[in-house]
Image (spheres, rainbow, N blue to C red):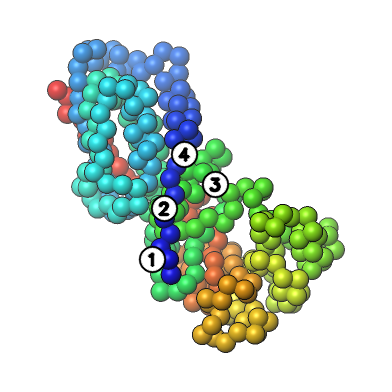
Amino acid sequence: MTTPFLPVLSPLMVEEQVRAALGEDLGRAGDITSQATIAPDMTATAGLNSREDGVVAGLDLARAAFRLMDPAIRFEAFVKDGDTLSPGTVIATVSGPARAVLSAERVALNFLMHLSGVASYTARFSREIAHTHARVCCTRKTIPGLRALEKYAVRMGGGSSHRYGLDDAILIKDNHIAVAGGVAGAIRAARAFAGHLVKVEVEVTTLEELEEALEAQPDVVLLDNMGPELLRRAVEINRDCAGLADAAYAADPRRVKLEASGNVNLSTIRAIAETGVDYISTSKITMAAPTLDIGLDVVVG
């Protein structure tokens, strides 16, 4: 299997996100605590240190927070996004005007701790299924305004993205099927509407719906809230429909791909992956990820 390149955050998006966060934090008068207690000519050096095991993500946003606060601040990273951390790992050092360093601290840490938390939690899910061909995927269930950043962090943790929004892929869900009048009819309507580069996925809840869907040949079938036994049977149905032997099934690019969702957590994902599904989607890795504990320790010079 080809190892994929890691994504890169757009510098324009990074700047926009960080500017908005700094503006929210600084308000109308700026950091009045630092202005009141620190002389304008004082400098500081600070270390960004990990306090627990994890995977780092969001360094570009942390760097931008300090740079936008004062271009004179020097930011030196000792790790890169996607690297593993342990307690005591020095992630980066910053040095420059003390007022600016402290004023940017919270925004830099907010981005770094949240995105590293997402990457770290995703890595835990990914490790559980590393012995299978399945991939864990994030969904559209993200914090408003942070979707691109959270999906980037998922990639840093070894996960994949389902779809970015409503406009980059077609996902036919139960309500669409109800209005369209059936699974196959909804798939055919989607095929007629979509451009040739747009993938079509349909959600099913029963094996009967799966069989109907496979006849209409979507790109992906989402198996919603099926336990391991039903998922295993769904894989068998898909294999038989494609006329493939067990050994050829996983790698064959022509067959319909299967995605599992519902009741996915760290205690269930291994059994789900071992059924032979291709993808496992969950909101847990974005919506339930705890922040990674990262501290900023300052030495005033």
Where does label 3 land, which residue?
A: 142
The alpha-carbon separation of the residues under discs 4 and 2 comes to 13 Å
For label 3, the crowd category at 10 Å Cα-Cα, with few meaning under 14, some 14 to 19 and many 20 or more, is: some
Question: Where is residue 278 drawn, in percent x and y?
Answer: 54, 70
Q: Is residue 38 above or below residue 172?
A: above
Where does label 1 land, which residue?
A: 127
Residue 175 visible? The answer is no
Q: Nearer the viewer, residue 189 or 202?
A: 189
Residue type at the position of mark 1: Arg
Quadrant of res 299: top left
Closer to the chain start, of discs 3 and 1, is 1
The alpha-carbon separation of the residues under discs 1 and 4 comes to 28 Å
The alpha-carbon separation of the residues under discs 2 and 1 comes to 18 Å
Dot in front, 2 or 3: 2
Give me the residue at 45% from left, 26% from top: 19
Element under disc 1: helix
Dot in front, 2 or 1: 2
For label 4, the crowd category at 10 Å Cα-Cα, with few meaning under 14, some 14 to 19 and many 20 or more, is: few
Q: Of the numbered discs in the image, which one, if any, rests on residue 10?
A: 4
Element under disc 3: loop
Quadrant holding the N terminus: bottom left
Residue type at the position of mark 4: Ser
Q: Of the numbered discs in the image, which one, if any, rests on residue 6?
A: 2
**Residues marked 3 and 1 touching at CB (< 8 Å):** no
Give me the residue at 29% from left, 54% from top: 84
Closer to the chain start, of discs 2 and 1, is 2
Q: Is residue 154 left or right of residue 34?
A: right
For label 2, the crowd category at 10 Å Cα-Cα, with few meaning under 14, some 14 to 19 and many 20 or more, is: few
The alpha-carbon separation of the residues under discs 2 and 3 comes to 20 Å
